[in-house]
Amino acid sequence: MNDMEALRTRHSVREYLDKPIEPEILRQLQAIVEGVAKESGLDIQLLQDNPEAFDLVARFGLIRGCRTLIAFVAHKKDQDEAIGYWGQHIVLEAQKMGLNTCWVALFSRKKCHAVCPPGNEARVVVAVGYGATQGKPRKTKQASDIVTIEPGVDKPAWFDAAVEAALLAPTAMNRQDFHLELSPTGDLHVDVPGTGLTNIDKGIVRRNIEVAKDAHQ
Ligand SMILES: Cc1cc2nc3c(=O)[nH]c(=O)nc-3n(C[C@H](O)[C@H](O)[C@H](O)COP(=O)(O)O)c2cc1C
């Protein structure tokens, strides 16, 4: 599976099989997490046996049967965009390895085993494991809802694939609260309102756009 296939087949999965991740796959995932942590400078922790983190009383957004998670530890919202950008790389690598995932903001920070320096906490986690299903496509905005092209600017060859990739990006509550603007220099800017989890979404969208652009080279 290549990156674009991973991006197109990935859907949030909220119910997991009681099947441990194979040791070799876990080793590869750990290596990816460590590599990304080193390259990005982020504090990212693979927690292999922490089902309690999803033990919550809530009416929606619950994750069932998942024991393994990747925690992004940060000071408040300071690193949100980087967390989205680098976390989505890990999510797509996991998809390529036959694993399923879900970004999760609604989890128990008390029961999460992430080791947090004073003042920091697990900002968001990614649930990872073998899904009971592969998830399914969800409602999405259309390109015309989210794109602005400045007058006189020609669409680059990668443009349509990049917009598709942006629309396939997971966003908190499926809000898709972002806007893409193609500038005269041919750069595609991602704008978000800058509240809540939107900067994590922004990082995720930026990663998906980059994957689509790279696939066009
Ligand atoms: C930052 C962030 C936080 C999220 N938190 C939760 C969550 O707490 N619970 C949940 O079930 N889904 C959560 N999601 C998953 C979104 O609901 C999901 O990505 C969105 O509905 C789009 O669906 P898709 O991932 O299948 O494309 C989160 C996604 C993001 C990006």
Image (tube, rainbow, N blue to C red):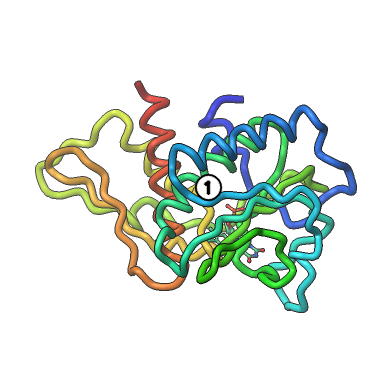
Helix, strand, or loop for circle 1?
helix
Does 45 appear above or below 117?
A: above
Please identify the quarter of the rendering in which residue 139 is found: bottom right
The amino acid type found where label 1 is placed reads: Gly
* Crowding at mark 1 (Cα within 10 Å: few <14, some 14-19, many 20+): many
Q: Is 152 left or right of 26, judged from the image as shown? A: left
Does 171 appear above or below 182?
A: below
Q: Position of residue 53 (x, y in %)?
A: 74, 64
Where on the image, by quarter, is ligand 1?
bottom right
Task: Residue at 55% x, 59% y: name it.
Answer: 73
Which residue is farthest right? 18
Q: Position of residue 196 (x, y in %)?
A: 45, 72
Residue that mark 1 sits on = 87
Q: Nearer the viewer, residue 164 or 206?
A: 206
Task: Residue at 70% x, 71% y: name it.
Answer: 108
Q: Position of residue 145 (x, y in %)?
A: 35, 59
Does 48 appear above or below 35?
A: below
